[in-house]
Amino acid sequence: MTTQLTPGGGLSAGDAPVGWRDRKRYLWLLGLFIPTMLFLILPVVWGLNQLGWHTASQTLFFIGPFLLYVMLPIADIRLGVDGQNPPESMMEQLDLDKYYRYCIYAYIPLQYASVVLGAYLFTAKDLSWLGYQGPLGWLGKIGLALSVGIIGGVAINTAHELGHKRDSLERWLSKIALAQVCYGHFYIEHNRGHHVRVATPEDPASARFGESFWAFLPRTVIGSAKSAFSLEAARIRRTGKNPWNPLTWLGNDVLNAFLMSVGFWAVMLAIFGPELIPLIVFQALYGPSLLESVNYLEHYGLLRQKLPDGRYERCAPQHSWNSDHLATNLFLYHLQRHSDHHANPTRRYQILRSMDGAPNLPAGYGALIALTYFPPLWRKFMDHRVVEHYNGDITKANLNPRRRAKLLARYGGVD
């Protein structure tokens, strides 16, 4: 029997695991399409060039944004919601099955192989073997930079999955995945900052009701970096050491992650030359922006209420926006089952569940990332959902302090 979900996302009463199987077991390999997509398009690029369609062949290097902004939303609409949670009796077996770990591990070598390929294509002066006369044109280079940035942006999600685990290998793999986009501080801030302060005004990665993505982006980038340095400095002080002593820097998980980025790109610059600098800078800006657009939509407007003792209530399913759309979940390793992730941060992606009580989005993250770029459309799409989630009482929402008075006047809330 296949375990079904109730309308709220929980397991139906009376379901039994007899004959249960993970129907997504081999579909998780689809996640490896992203770090291999540049290799996969090369034969098609060559074929189009043989036909003399040189401009059309360069548009293929936009495969990353085409996948993210077009194909994933369409796939989510066509495939719909998942509708399957793993039964309790299968959780341990699924957790111990190393196949699922290898699906994640494989992303990283493929990621860096694609970065090297992208660097070569971006800087090569002679691509006659690919059918071009001379170097890749700027149309192709722009598409290539976007696709390399998307590979790095999705790698942050891979790092997110690995960074929560207790195994030291997986933690180091997390840092390696982050090195491409120079976002190593995420390893510290997400695990020890965001998960503690999520859905509170103190969390730089929790978007406020009425806050645009473009206002959120600098706040979260700067705030998360500062928080990561502060958290790691406090950890080092607890060991009796001075965090600013150069002898402690290699043991500082923010600095050593940053040094990994410096070392990697220094080697790449030595190989491919200064012509690579535009690609380095662009992908280091664009890749993390994808993570932050997901951060923006995951907790937009949601707030944990304060208890009488002044502390915040425990994080619960209602403090994360979920989506159980199948296609995006396959490419992002169940990231959209975000409530269960916050309740059980070390739980591996294959056993994350859709939970009762979580507010659900009508579309997958793949469709919503682009929507975050357009604040009027985002507000029209999401603001009424936040209001409905709090039954019209927006004083319970995480309000943008700069727009608090206007929001209260508009929606009838009273301080």
Image (cartoon, rainbow, N blue to C red):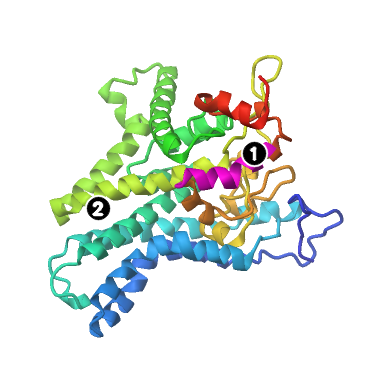
- Residue 161, percent across and down? 51, 47
Q: Is residue 88 left or right of residue 327?
A: right
Q: Secondary structure at mark 1?
A: helix
The residue singled out by tag 1 in the image is 386
- Left or right side of 343 for 127: left
Nearer-the-camera pick, 123 or 87: 123
- The magenta stretch spans residue 333: no
x, y percent for residue 375: 48, 43
Q: Quadrant of residue 333?
A: bottom right
Residue that badge 2 annotates: 279
Residue furthest to the top: 309
> Which residues, given as a range, are shown in magenta?
373-387
Residue 300 vs 412, above or below: the answer is: below
Tell me residue 353's x, y (percent). 67, 50
Cα separation between marks 2 and 1 = 38 Å
User: Is mark 2 in CB contact (under 8 Å) with mark 1?
Assistant: no
The x, y position of residue 369, in whole percent, is: 49, 51
- Name which residue type carries label 1: Val
User: In terms of secondary structure, what is the magenta stretch mainly?
Assistant: helix
Q: Is residue 186 visible?
A: yes
142 is higher (above) or lower (below) than 389: below
**Could you tell me which secondary element the residue under label 2 belongs to?**
helix
Is residue 376 on the magenta stretch? yes
Could you tell me which residue is drawn at 78 percent across and 61 percent down? 17
Identify which residue is drawn at 40% across, 60% down: 65
